[in-house]
Amino acid sequence: MSRIEPQPGIMEIELYVGGKATVDGVSDVVKLSSNENPYGCSDTAKEAVAKAGHNLHRYPNTDHASLRAAISEVHNLDADRIICGVGSDEILQFIAQCFAGPGDEVIYTEHGFSMYPILAHAVGATPVKVAERERVVDVDAILAACTDKTKIVFIANPANPTGTMVGSNEMARLASSLPDGAILVHDGAYTEYVEGFDGGAGLVDAQSNVIMTRTFSKIYGLGGLRIGWGYASKDIVDVLNRVRQPFNLSVVQMAVAEAAVRDQAFVKKCREDNARMRAWLAEALAELGVPSDTSCANFILARFSSREEAEACDDYLKTQGLIVRRTTGYDLANCLRITVGDEAGCRRVAHAIGKFKDGAR
Ligand SMILES: *Cc1c(COP(=O)(O)O)cnc(C)c1O
């Protein structure tokens, strides 16, 4: 018998399952399974990729100063309190690594993002799942679940895969009512889809136990490049930076992210197109007898009458070259999460669901 044993928690991890990108035997596929931007990324970001190509022999800078300065200017935040990572997933990982360990509890919610329990197990902490109220995060239920072992509470706002939001007052009440020493992580992957929303930055400024995370993977259309960032108190950022590898972001990642964040006209256009097509899609599906909660993000959670119907619809959509996301792993077996595509993508998925409802299999 081998005596080589992984650390506590590692073998509890259920591997993350990404959205599918292909269907066997179907060539004209629309991928609506990973909440990607159907319009791609900003042209200036693409130009930055080419330019950065001239510097590939140079090590990147370790302090991300220029990227943090750009983020700080655009969002009016203190650059010294920003940390950049390989996707916001890496920031979430730093948080778990620095602030939770064996014997500690990490709270996430019933339909919360599946990375949260993975991150808790990875550091040997105990993930604690708290019920939601009709697919909305329930602050009172979270507070009731807190113990003196609670170290981190992860909430995505807007949430994935439900698309629902908790109001700023409720988030503030949660932050100020957490036990001493517990951190609230305000995961803002979909912040930019909400007009005028600061993603929790104001809450970070008001409460020293809050960390905001953001990403370039969603509205910026740069999921393939892997860049995210976090904003927190100086003390917390100082802690997180100690576990960050000095060269975690490449020359290309930083150059492209900086160009992307400076192109807020692109972000605005994507937010508006998304809002229009999201409303259209939600209404089209509702008319077909497939309701959804009002979504604040770039996807809708389509609710079917049963798990069987949701799965049959998913199977049919695949035959039509439409890839959406099953949400069985999120305790939402009767639902399918559908990313809001461009107009053609939305029309195609609504049309196919209509045919499915008419009996096509
Ligand atoms: C997509 C997503 C992320 C972003 O992950 P990246 O590592 O930045 O690509 C984080 N949280 C939630 C809830 C998401 O849906």
Image (cartoon, grey):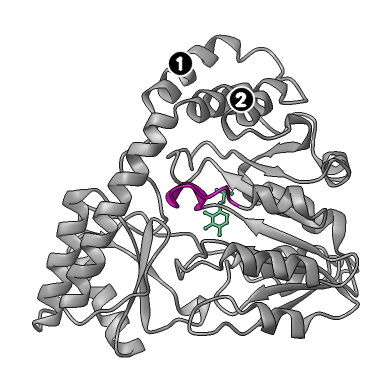
Q: Nearer the viewer, mark 1 or mark 2?
A: 2
For residue 212, above or below residue 118: above
Q: Secondary structure at mark 1?
A: helix
Q: Percent x, y for residue 331? A: 51, 82
| Circle on res. 335 | none
Look at mark 2 in the image and give the residue it sits on: 70
> Was residue 194 drawn as part of the magenta stretch in this picture?
yes
Q: Who's the residue at 21% across and 61% down the image?
A: 280
Q: Secondary structure at mark 2?
A: helix
> Which of 253 and 68 lies nearest the eye of the viewer?
68
Q: Who's the residue at 76% across and 85% down the image?
A: 144
Q: Percent x, y for residue 179? A: 86, 72
Q: Who's the residue at 83% across and 39% down the image?
A: 241
| Circle on res. 50 | 1
Q: Which residues are magenta?
A: 190-199
Q: Percent x, y for residue 330? A: 51, 76
In the shown orientation, is residue 310 left or right of residue 329? left
For residue 21, above or below residue 301: above
User: Where does the N terminus fall, quadrant-wise?
Assistant: bottom right
